[in-house]
Image: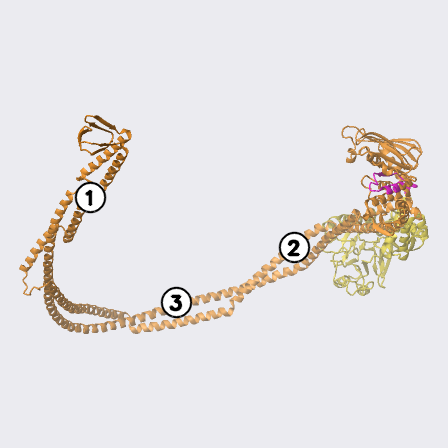
Amino acid sequence: MRIRRIGLRNYRGVVERDVTLLPAGSETGVTVVEGANEVGKTSLADAIWHALDFQDSSKAKEIAALKPVDRDVGTEITLELECGPYAFTYLKRFNKDRETRLAITAPRAETLTGREAHERVRSMLDESIDVPLWEALRVRQGTALSQAEVSETRGLARALESEAGATAIGEREADLYERVATEFRAYFTQTGQDGKELKAARKAREQAEETLQEVEGQLAALEEDIERIDRLERELPTLRGRVVQCERTAEEQTAELTRVARLEQDVQACAHAVEAADATAEAARERHDARLRLLAEVEEAQADLAELRQQVDDDQRHLASAVDAHASAQMRLEEARVAAKAADEVAVLCQEDLDHLREANELADLHARQERVAASSEQILELQERCDANRVDQAVLERLRPLHLEVEKTAAALSAGSPRVRLDTDADVTLEIDGADVAVAAGERVEHTVASRWSAVLPGLGTVAVEAGQGAETLAREHSATRRALSEALAEAGVSDLSEAERAAEERRDAEAALAGARGVRDHALDGASSNEIDERIALLERRTADYETTRTSELRLPATAEDAATSLEEAKEAASLAARALAVAVGEEQAARERVQGLRDEGQDRLVRREVVTDTVTRLSERLARERQVTTDEDLLEAWEEAGYARTAAYDRLAEARKRLRDADPEAVRALADNAVASAEDARRRLREADDDLRDLRARVEVRGGEGLFDERARAQAALDAAEAHDRRLRRRAEAARTLKETFDAHRDASRRRYVGPLTEQIVKLGRLVNAGAVFDVELDEDLRIHKRVLDGVPLDFDALSAGAQEQLSLIGRVACATLVADNGGAPLIIDDSLGYSDADRLEAMGAVLRIAGQHCQIIVLTCYPDRYRHVGGATTVSLT
Amino acid sequence: MVRFVHTADWQLGLRRHFLDPDAQARFTDARLDAVRRIGELAEREGCAFVTVAGDVFEDNHVERRVVWRALEAMESIPVPVYLLPGNHDPLNAGSIYRSGDFSTHAPANVTVLDTWEPVPAGDGVEILAAPWSSKRPLEDLCAAVIDGASDPDPGTTRILVAHGIVDTLSPDPMNPAQIAVEALDRALGDGRVQFVGLGDRHSTTEVGASGRVWYAGAPEATGFDESDPGNALVVDLHGGRCEVEAHRIGSWRFIDEGFALDGDEDVDIVRDWLARVPDPKRAIVRVSFVGTLSLRGRAALDRILDDASEVFGALQTWERHTDLAVLADDADVTDLGLAGFARDAVDALSGRVAEDPGDEAAGDALRLLHRLAGAGG
């Protein structure tokens, strides 16, 4: 294939561009398209694929992005191509005013439009070139370092196959492989798992199995029902027989039960009879006992009465002796009482004596105190007078002292601050000074401090006046003020000056001290009382002592002193105490004797009463006994009791007998058997009923289900399963065939691919030697036909470990090798968008040679902004874009 | 003397899974037609009645439609028809004969032999029946029925109608229900019965040496393992003699055929054989192959079978009995005209088959390749 010309309009930033890539007449050759960045070189390459790959109606983002941003216009691409026998011009406009137009010029002229045109172009390309290989070989901008993915492309394989000397792989093999792969994909997923159809077949088979199982289950259930009906029908007579039998047994057992009930009633009746006999016997015994009790009571009462009579006699004797004892106790009490009274009187007298003597002592003391009070009161009066006369006490003195000091101070200040007049006279003279005449002796000096004004008439001479001036006058005023204050204070104190005041103060202090002493003496003598009180007390005591002495009548002598009286009092009190204790004892003894007498009297009275009562009782009981005996004799009672006992024993025997009869009948067993028989009958009836019900239900069910054609349903389900299984089996077998075929094909294709490695390696090495001149250059290819290792002078290095320049060169050489290999057989232009950016000048030159060689075999289009890189490509056509 | 039709094993409602729906419909219709033909036979041969010795129906649970249509067909029989419940249609609680449908639709000439008491069937003739009341009887019903019945009046002809396998044909001591031939012979010998009409075996078969014990066989074939199906018997009892004559009734056939193929040219034998099968619409054919074919031969055989399957009632390949190796010969490979790795792959697959003719995957893969390559032209 050859691209002669590309025209672009409104393609990205390109408004309009028309580039001739291969001049008419040339079939191969290198075209270097140079131009600055952004000028649209890459657009040129992209446009080829856009025009070929996309319908004009495409809404792909990639296509929409081709529209110029600033104008609402369609993007137009025109290609002039030759491939195989075809030559044509192809126009495609995207996005706006969409259009596809194809003008074929060879082998015969033809014009197509729209989708038809698009598809025609695709088919012409597919027919003449290996499109995937072509796309794989393209060097896109920025991909220069990566190798082309060529292993899956058919054209290369065909070329290599031919190079390898094997039979050429034709369309046929390639198509067949495609079909094998398609067949495989019809059954399996990419990863070899079961595909949709296989899964569906298996699912269908499983579902058919399930359906069959379900129907078979229903059939089995139906058969089960039928068998149950048969079974129940066989069982029914047995069940009916059992009902009859059970009911008969129940009847028999019920009769037995009635007999037992009668025996139970017998027992009940005998038990009642026993109770009655018991009661009768008890009553007879009770009556007999009552008679015995009455007899005992009579005897007891008579014994009581005899004893009481004896006791009353004893009581009389005891009382007489107690009365005697009481009389003598009374006598002893009287004597003790007299003695106690006498002792008390002595003690009172002694107490009175002591009181009297103590009052006499107090009276003497009071007299002495009265004298001391009188003396000290006199002294106090005198001292008080003295104090009252002297007004200068310590406070007055304290007031005077600062005043005096103030006077002194102002005087000093006046004398210092006033003019002083000194007048020395030579002769005696009388002077009138300040209006007063003053006689001055010769030689005497008159001195004066002028407080304010001073004048002296010098006889005959005139008057001398001195004025003190302002300051001196002030001082003088202060001084006179202080003096006035002092003299007023002195006058008030009644003294003439300070020293006198100090003396007066001292005298007053002495008088006050003496006054305090005299008052202390008087207060001590008064001892809290007033003088009058003392006087009254003295008068009282004098009267009482006098009275006592006159009124005391006892023959006992009055003690001399209070101490003696106290001693006597103690002795008298002791004697009185002893007498009182003796009296108390006598009182107690008299009371005890009296109480005993009273006690005996009461006791005797009680006994008399009791004797009366017991006498009554004896009478009453005797009468009652006689009465009762008239009704029933003691013998009759005894006999009745014994007879009742016999009757009771007989009743007990009858009861025991009835019980034994009942026990022998075994009522529990009879009852249990009867219950059981009734229950069994009920059970049998119930089972029969259930069987009937079951049978009815089952028959109804079988009638319905039996008519549903389950047999046919199963047959259909079985058929469906068979079909599903067969389908699954067949499908699986076909799938396995496809898998086996695909795997076999793959294995052999891989093997043959390994054979392709040889020719491609050879081609690469041939070209690579140009770049690595002087060295032993070799490469190793992997199964995907990619350069795996480079060997330079025997040193192998992984492709990935090579320098960027070497990678770039090898990648390009690989592409060139592929392109040249397929050039004779459906080759296509090798488009290189900006490569060799990493290569040095020497390598560039060598690469130029490589491209030139390649250009001899096919069309090569180089897009670059560095035309220098490619200036070594001999015979290249250069197209400049501006 | 009496003359009657003895038949059995109608198996009405029978389904065969290898039949497609159309063929199944024809197959079903054929069984009903057989019933009508039995009626025609009875009329033609002057028979007094028809006895059906069990398995009238394939199953107690067939669709009710089957029952209705069967009764309709029986109605067309101009003489009384006596139906015996067999092991397929026993007289249990689910029995067709007890169903409402049956009693509602049964025509007047149809009697179900559901009792052990002798059933009068015209002047001086009684039918003694041994109906199955469950699918698994626990005794020899024939012997039990014979022992249980009172002796026939002198001059009365008594026909025993029973169903089941006889001990002489398939001795199985574990089967308590198998019919003792000796007991039958004894009963025949002492005149308690004059004829024993048996069902169960689908091939017409005489039992014992008396000439009076017969399996009628199915009037319409049911499977591959039957040697002489498709008949009904006309029995003529008169004086001391018994004459039994089989009449063809059935129209369907089951055919098993094995082929030895030792080369592609043998495929023609198969084609010719298939072409010669008469009335293929009513033929159910099972073929099996042993031998070796080339890819082309195998493809040809497949085509022949494909084409024939349209013509036959059913045409199956019996895989279990088929052992057919497919080898790619030089011509096959040359025909493909392949080169390179494709050629290598074909050679490898051919090699696998040559080494192991049982390598199904390789054989299939080769055939697939052949098809793909062929389709590719």
How far across and how far down the image is residue A789, in percent? Answer: 84, 50
Q: Identify the image quadrant of the C terminus of chain B.
A: top right
**Three-letter residue code for mark 2:** Asp
Q: Which mark is residue A566?
A: none
**Three-letter residue code for mark 1:** Glu
Could you tell me which secondary element the residue under label 3 belongs to? helix
Badge 1, how many Cα within 10 Å: few under 14, some, many 20+?
some
Label 2 belongs to which residue?
A: A694
How far across and how far down the image is residue B228, in percent? Answer: 86, 56
Marks 2 and 1 in Cβ contact (< 8 Å): no
Label 1 belongs to which residue?
A: A502
How far across and how far down the image is residue A126, in percent? Answer: 88, 39
Q: Which residues are magenta?
A: A822-848
Badge 2, how many Cα within 10 Å: few under 14, some, many 20+?
some
**Three-letter residue code for mark 3:** Ala
Which numbered disc, 2 or 1, marks the residue closer to the eye? 1
Label 3 belongs to which residue?
A: A276
Badge 3, how many Cα within 10 Å: few under 14, some, many 20+?
some
Letter of the chain shown yellow in the rendering: B
Question: Nearest the camera: A218 or B305?
Answer: B305
| Vertical placement of residue A311 versus B129, above or below | below
- Same chain for the residues under marks 2 and 1 in the image: yes
Chain A pictured colour: orange
Could you tell me which secondary element the residue under label 1 belongs to? helix
Question: Nearest the camera: B16 or B346?
Answer: B346
Give the CA distance from mark 2 to mark 1: 157 Å
Give the CA distance from mark 1 to mark 3: 144 Å
